[in-house]
Image: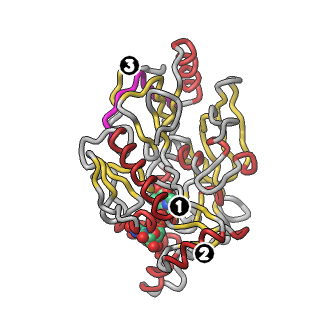
Amino acid sequence: MLQIHRDHPLDRLTTFGLKSIAEAYAEAHDAEELREAFAAAKREGWRVHVIGGGSNTIAMPRVRGLVLRAAMTGCRIEPLSEGGARVEAGAGELLDRVVRLSVSSGFGGLENLAMIPGTVGGAVVQNVGAYGLELAERFERCRAYDPDSDEIRTLSLEECDFGYRHSVFKTPSAARLVVLSADLRLPGRWRPTAGYKDLAAQLSAERLAHPTPADVERVVRELRARKLPDPKQVGNAGSFFKNPVVNRVKANELLSKHPSLTAYPLAGGRVKLAAAWLIEAAGLKGLKLGRAAVYARHALILVNEGGADGEDVAALSRLIVDRVKERFGVTLEPEPVVMGESAGNIL
Ligand code: EPU
C-alpha cells in the first residue's frame, strides 16, 4: 500500500542536501504503487516529480505537488550462452551497486561508470557517462509506466534516442513516462574502454598493459574519489553544467586566444569544451555565494557549504552562466533538474 506523506522534508532525499519541503511525498516500490501514486495525484491535482537517488535534482525551498521516489529495486545478472551477460535492474537500484555486482560476478562492461551516484532509472533518463563510456552503449531496453494510458511499455535503444546526457525521457513526448527497470547487455569479448586521458594515464603509470574490469573499476573509483566531493560529506549534484558544444569557428576563435582551453573534437565538426576550464578561467573556482560555492578542487561542481537552499544554488548558477557568457561568449546549460513551485526550470 502506498503511503503519502504531506509537507515532507526533502533535505536527505537529494545529494545536494538542500533545505526543502514537498507538498506530498511517496515511495513506489513496484508498478502497482506507481499506479496508486498517479491516481492520488490525479485526485488531488498534483504535478508529479519523479526522483531516484536525487543526485541530479535541485529542490527549491517549497516543492508543489507530489515528489515520488522510484524505489523499484532488484538486480539479476544472467550469463548468456553467446558470452557476456544481461543485467536486469530495477529503476530504484543504485547504479553503483549494479556496477559492483556485475564486475564481481566476472562480467566487464560497466566498470567505467563506477561511483556515479544515483539510480538505474536516473542513469537511463540522463544517459549518464564517465571516463569514455555512456550508459547507452550497454543499454538494450527498458520498461516504463505510462500514466496517461495506465500501461507498461517497453522502449528499445532506438526509441530512447540517447545523446550526451540526453534521452527521450527528457523530451515532451516521453517526459511523463516513469522508468520501471532496464536491461543492460555486457559484452562477451570485453576490452577496456581506456581512451579517457586521466584513466589512460593512471593505467599506464601502474604499468597495466592488460587491465581487467576490476582494475579499471578500481582506478575509476580512485580518480573520482580524488576529484569529486563525496555527497555524504559535502552536498553536491556532480557536474552542474553540461560541457558545451560549439561549432569549429567558435572553437578556433577561443583556442587561438586561449591555447590551454580543453576541447574535444566531435564527429560532424563540432567541438565539446570543458565547462570546468571556462569556469576556472573566468576566475570563479572556489567562489562562494550565500551558502553555496564552486568546489575548490573542481570548477564544474557546485557544493552546499552547509544549510544551503535552492535559492542559493540558483543564484550561484546564474552568476556563473552570466560571467562565462560575458567572458567567452559561450552559454552553459545546467545539468540538474529543478523541482519547485512552478513547472519551469529557473536555473
Ligand atoms: N578542468 C579545469 N578546472 C577544473 C577541473 C577541470 O580547467 O577545476 C579542465 C581540465 O582541463 C580537464 C577538463 O576540464 O581536463 C575536464 O575535466 P574532467 O576530466 O574532470 O571532466 P569533466 O568534463 O569536468 C565529465 C563529466 C563527468 C565525468 C567526467 C569523467 C560532464 C558534464 N561531466 O566531467 O560526469 O565523471 O567527465 O568522464 O560531462 C556528471 O555528469 O555529474 C559527472 C561527474
**Looking at the picture, does residue 347 appear above or below residue 196?**
above
Q: Which residue is mark 3?
A: 6
Q: Which residue is mark 2?
A: 252
Residue 57 image position (x, y, % from top left): 45, 42
Q: Residue at x 39, y 20 (%)?
A: 5
x, y (%) of residue 115? 43, 58
Q: Amino acid at mark 1?
A: Gly
Visible residue check, residue 232:
no
Where residue 245 sits, quadrant-wise, is bottom right
Q: Is residue 101 left or right of residue 166?
A: left
The answer to whether residue 339 is visible is yes
Which residue: 72% across, 61% down?
81
Taking the spot 59% from the left edge, 23% from the top edge, the residue there is 35
Return the residue at label 1: 329
Mark 2 residue element: helix
Above/below status of 108 relative to 231: below
Mark nearest the camera among 1 and 3 is 1
